């Protein structure tokens, strides 16, 4: 193994699957806790809201025909290693889709989840404009542990809104978060599905 594959091997060994991640969130919330070292009430409240969002998305996401067809034709086997935290709103909106894609891939794509703040050495290899933005998806060939690429932390239309807000915050952070989740609700994962089609094609080539 190369040094890179050894690194991935060590992180994948402690990563968990999506059902285990949902169970982790549920168990933490039972104790009024969230993931990570910061246990402020706001983050616990965000986690509770995220858990309910994810439960809803688990039942309502419908993959479009182009994405379904692409998954049926996929020949490679990949592991999608996702760096996240339970309190992250973007993660709650996007990780359920990654799981849905994994299920539809009939075993070709395996989603594994790892917590950012317990694995900062890994996170710091995948910064977004110098920030530890999450979620981040790392596409890895399952058999060779070769990296194919990464996606994250949010669909491009929303990323553009976030960057514009950071340059010129014309409303409070809470108001912006409401706008963010309203956009996600109206979009119904379609922007991200379109992106995943593009990324899957790129990673397959």
Image (spheres, rainbow, N blue to C red):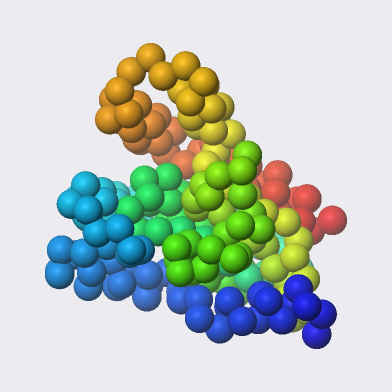
Give the residue displayed 57% in from the left and 59% down from the top.
123
Describe residue 9's horizontal placement relative to residue 36 as left or right.
Answer: right
- Point out the residue furthest to the left here: 31
Q: Is residue 198 above or below residue 15?
A: above
Describe residue 106's horizontal placement relative to residue 84 as left or right.
Answer: right
Give the residue displayed 41% in from the left and 19% down from the top.
169
| Residue 94 visible (yes or no) | yes
The x and y percentages for residue 148 are 76, 61
The x and y percentages for residue 75 are 76, 68
Res. 193 image quadrant: top right
Describe residue 202's horizontal placement relative to residue 37 as left or right.
Answer: right
The x and y percentages for residue 122 are 60, 65
The quarter of the image holding the C terminus is bottom right
| Residue 105 visible (yes or no) | no
Res. 137 image quadrant: bottom right
Question: Foreground: 18 or 85?
Answer: 85
The quarter of the image holding the N terminus is bottom right
Give the residue displayed 26% in from the left and 51% down from the top.
43
Question: Foreground: 193 or 171?
Answer: 171
* Count of picture labels: 0
The x and y percentages for residue 131 are 55, 44
Give the residue displayed 37% in from the left and 70% down from the top.
21
Describe residue 73's horizontal placement relative to residue 41 as left or right.
Answer: right
Q: Is residue 81 above or below residue 196?
A: below
Q: Is residue 3 above or below residue 162?
A: below
């Amino acid at each position: 193994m190369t040094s890179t594959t050894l690194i991935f091997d060590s992180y994948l060994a402690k990563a968990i699957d999506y059902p285990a991640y949902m169970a982790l969130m549920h168990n933490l919330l039972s104790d009024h806790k969230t993931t990570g070292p910061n246990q402020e009430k706001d983050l616990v409240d965000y986690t509770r809201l995220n858990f309910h969002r994810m439960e809803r998305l688990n039942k309502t996401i419908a993959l479009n025909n182009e994405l379904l067809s692409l998954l049926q034709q996929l020949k490679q086997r990949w592991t999608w290693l996702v760096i996240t935290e339970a309190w992250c709103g973007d993660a709650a909106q996007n990780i359920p889709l990654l799981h849905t894609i994994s299920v539809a891939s009939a075993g070709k794509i395996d989603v594994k989840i790892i917590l950012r703040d317990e694995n900062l050495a890994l996170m710091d290899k995948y910064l977004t404009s110098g920030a530890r933005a999450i979620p981040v998806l790392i596409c890895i060939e399952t058999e060779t542990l070769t990296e194919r690429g990464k996606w994250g932390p949010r669909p491009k239309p929303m990323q553009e809104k976030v960057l514009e807000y950071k340059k010129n915050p014309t409303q409070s952070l809470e108001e912006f978060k409401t706008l963010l989740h309203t956009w996600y609700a109206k979009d119904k994962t379609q922007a991200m599905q379109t992106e995943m089609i593009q990324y899957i094609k790129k990673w397959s080539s």
